[in-house]
Image (cartoon, rainbow, N blue to C red):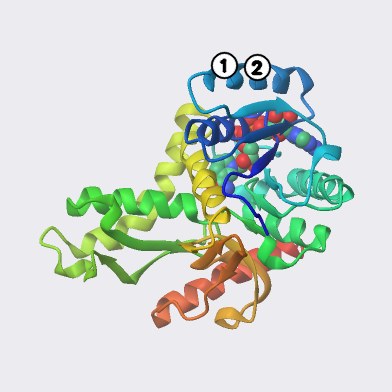
């Protein structure tokens, strides 16, 4: 359990786009006091650390440096972004083979230090990689989890807020399941300031009919246009790290290894979870329609098949 509000964060893959952008977001929001980057690309990560340090000159003394696994201590948070990103036209599951070996290797190295407080997995396919990291680490499932559908949920909230002409902060809605092609928008319980979506004057049924495809297309469009996505996921990690530093939990759709919740077992998918200094605890009982429960089961089947290499 993290004992302080401003923890030290290790970013493994910190030389890459997601890792370095995450370091910048953590430093800019002064969420942490120390950021340690680890990457196999030694020159790249050295350059990123120097550049990031210059970005912190006018903030409250956040330090960024290149480090090694031996420096990891029991209060540290590990963020794993090491792994290949998607190429245009590629699905996240197609990254599995290459990234599974990387995640297993870096998790073993992390654990050789005695083990950190938490491991937050970002590398794709994030649900499968979360299961790999959890299994390899031997840590409780509440301490090893993935960012899951937090980015998809951010995209959902932005899309709904724009379409309904309401403040993003008033939208309470989740994308759940796999962070991938089988994810689904759990809209039967979605609200804006407590109001069901259909009560909003600008609501149209077509909006919910097309929203999942629109969001999936957005992610693919960004990759086609600029090769990778990193600003959104960086702020997702900031939110997760902030939640891990607080005793009051935030409800976030992170990917955890479910152990009976929603009838699912030994598979990592996203459901609303309580995230705090006690880790990530999936909440059983988020109200899902019959259709949505079927979609969650399908998503879990897709991820479980990938975990067993049957995908
Ligand atoms: N979960 C999400 O919502 C989400 C969003 C965006 C990207 N991603 C994923 O994040 C990952 C990183 O994306 P990126 O754009 O930063 O890629 P990138 O290629 O820019 O960075 C990856 C970094 O990992 C490093 N690396 C590779 N193997 C390593 C090892 N064994 N130990 C340490 N470092 C190692 C590489 O040297 C590189 O610097 C990808 O898998 C991508 O799909 C996830």
Within 8 Å: ligand 1 and the Cβ of disc 2? no
Above or below, 215 relative to 232: below
User: Percent position (x, y) of residue 4?
Assistant: 62, 50
All told, the count of numbered labels is 2
Q: Is residue 204 above or below residue 12?
A: below
Quick check: can you spot residue 129? yes
Taking the image in four quarters, ligand 1 sits in the one at: top right
Of residue 154 and residue 302, the one placed in the foreground of this image is: 154
Residue located at (82% from left, 38% from top)? 71
What whole-number distance in Å separates the C-alpha atoms at marks 1 and 2?
7 Å
Q: For the C terminus, which image quadrant?
A: bottom right
- With 274 as the anchor, is 201 left or right in this view? left
Q: Which residue lies furthest to the right in this view?
A: 112
Q: Is mark 2 on a helix, strand or loop?
A: helix
**Is 76 displayed left or right of 287 in the figure?**
right
Residue 44 image point, x, y percent: 71, 20
* Element type where label 1 sits in the image: helix
Regarding residue 311, the answer to whether it shows in the image is no
The residue located at (76%, 65%) in the rendering is: 308
Residue 168, relative to residue 190: is it above or below?
Answer: above
Measured as percent of width and height from the top left, residue 203 is found at 16, 61
238 displayed left or right of 164: right
- For the point 35% across and 63% down, the residue is 173
From this viewpoint, which residue is outermost toward the left?
A: 201
Front residue of 213 and 100 = 100
Answer yes or no: do the residues labelled 1 and 2 have beta carbons within 8 Å? yes
- In the picture of the structure, the residue carrying the numbered disc 2 is 50
Residue denoted by label 1:
54
Neighbours of disc 1 within 10 Å: few (<14), some (14-19), many (20+): few
61 vs 195: above or below: above
């Amino acid at each position: 359990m993290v004992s302080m509000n401003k923890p030290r964060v290790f970013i493994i893959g910190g030389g890459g786009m997601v890792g370095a952008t995450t370091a910048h977001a953590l430093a800019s929001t002064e969420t942490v006091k120390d950021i340690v980057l680890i990457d196999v690309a030694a020159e790249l990560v050295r350059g990123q650390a120097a550049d990031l340090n210059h970005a912190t000159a006018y903030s409250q003394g956040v330090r960024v440096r290149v480090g090694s696994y031996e420096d990891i201590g029991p209060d540290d948070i590990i963020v794993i972004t090491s792994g290949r990103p998607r190429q245009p036209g590629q699905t996240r599951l197609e990254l599995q083979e290459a990234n599974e070996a990387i995640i297993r290797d870096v998790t073993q190295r992390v654990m050789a230090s005695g083990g950190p407080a938490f491991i937050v997995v970002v590398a794709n396919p994030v649900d499968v990689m979360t299961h790999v990291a959890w299994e390899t680490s031997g840590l409780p499932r509440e301490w090893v989890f993935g960012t899951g559908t937090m980015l998809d949920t951010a995209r959902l909230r932005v899309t709904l807020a724009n379409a309904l002409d309401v403040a993003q902060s008033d939208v309470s809605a989740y994308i759940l399941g796999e962070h991938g092609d089988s994810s689904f928008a759990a809209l039967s319980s979605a609200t804006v300031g407590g109001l069901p979506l259909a009560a909003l004057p600008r609501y149209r049924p077509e909006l919910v009919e097309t929203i999942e495809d629109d969001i999936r297309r957005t992610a693919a469009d960004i990759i086609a246009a600029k090769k990778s996505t990193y600003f959104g996921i960086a702020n997702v990690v900031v939110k997760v790290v902030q939640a891990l530093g607080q005793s009051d939990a935030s409800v976030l759709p992170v990917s955890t290894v479910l152990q009976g919740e929603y009838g699912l077992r030994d598979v990592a998918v996203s459901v609303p979870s309580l995230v705090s200094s006690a880790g990530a605890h999936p909440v059983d009982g988020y109200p899902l329609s019959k259709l949505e429960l079927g979609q969650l089961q399908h998503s879990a089947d897709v991820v479980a098949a990938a975990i067993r290499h049957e995908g």
